[in-house]
Image (cartoon, rainbow, N blue to C red):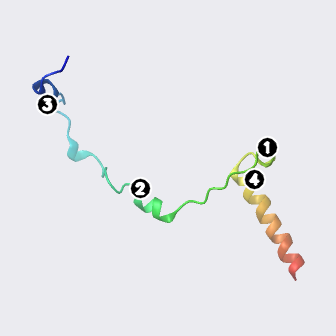
Amino acid sequence: MKTSNSTQDKDTLRPEYDFTQLKSRGRGRYAKHYREGTNLVLLASDVADVFPDDASVNEALRTLMRVGQLHAR
């Protein structure tokens, strides 16, 4: 059974809602973050078991970078 247009177009918002108080919303909200980009890397399951979070992965990679720099000299 179809509903009539009059029931679909009926304004059901309360009159006390003041949309001028809302912060900026809408298009482009995350555009700046998107332009900055993200760098996601998927870890193999055996590697992910050893490194439970991104901080531990970053620390291990920084250590490896330091060791590589020492051996390059």
Q: How would you rate the neighbour count of disc 2 (Cα within 10 Å): few for under 14, some for 14-19, many for 20 or more?
A: few
Q: Whole-Å distance between the Cαs marked 4 and 2?
A: 28 Å
Total numbered badges shown on the rendered structure: 4
Residue with the mark numbered 4:
56
In the image shown, does 19 or 65 lie closer to the viewer? 65
Q: The disc labelled 1 sits on which kind of residue?
A: Asp
Q: Does dot 2 land on a helix, a strand or a loop?
A: loop
Q: Does dot 3 land on a helix, a strand or a loop?
A: loop
Mark nearer the viewer, 3 or 2: 3
Above or below 43: residue 5: above
Q: Whole-Å distance between the Cαs marked 3 and 4?
A: 55 Å
Residue found 74% across the figure and 45% down from its top: 52
Q: The disc labelled 4 sits on which kind of residue?
A: Ser
- The answer to whether residue 72 is left or right of residue 10 is right
Residue 64 x, y percent position in the rendering: 82, 66
Residue 58 x, y percent position in the rendering: 73, 59
Name which of mark 4 and mark 2 comes first in the sequence: 2
Name which of mark 2 and mark 1 comes first in the sequence: 2
Residue with the mark numbered 3:
9
Q: Whole-Å distance between the Cαs marked 1 and 4?
A: 11 Å
Name which of mark 1 and mark 4 comes first in the sequence: 1
Name which of mark 3 and mark 2 comes first in the sequence: 3
Q: How would you rate the neighbour count of disc 4 (Cα within 10 Å): few for under 14, some for 14-19, many for 20 or more?
A: few
Residue with the mark numbered 2:
30
Residue 49 bears which disc, if any? 1
Name which of mark 1 and mark 3 comes first in the sequence: 3
Name which of mark 3 and mark 4 comes first in the sequence: 3
Mark nearer the viewer, 1 or 3: 3
View extreme (left): residue: 6
Mark nearer the viewer, 3 or 4: 3
Residue 70 x, y percent position in the rendering: 87, 76
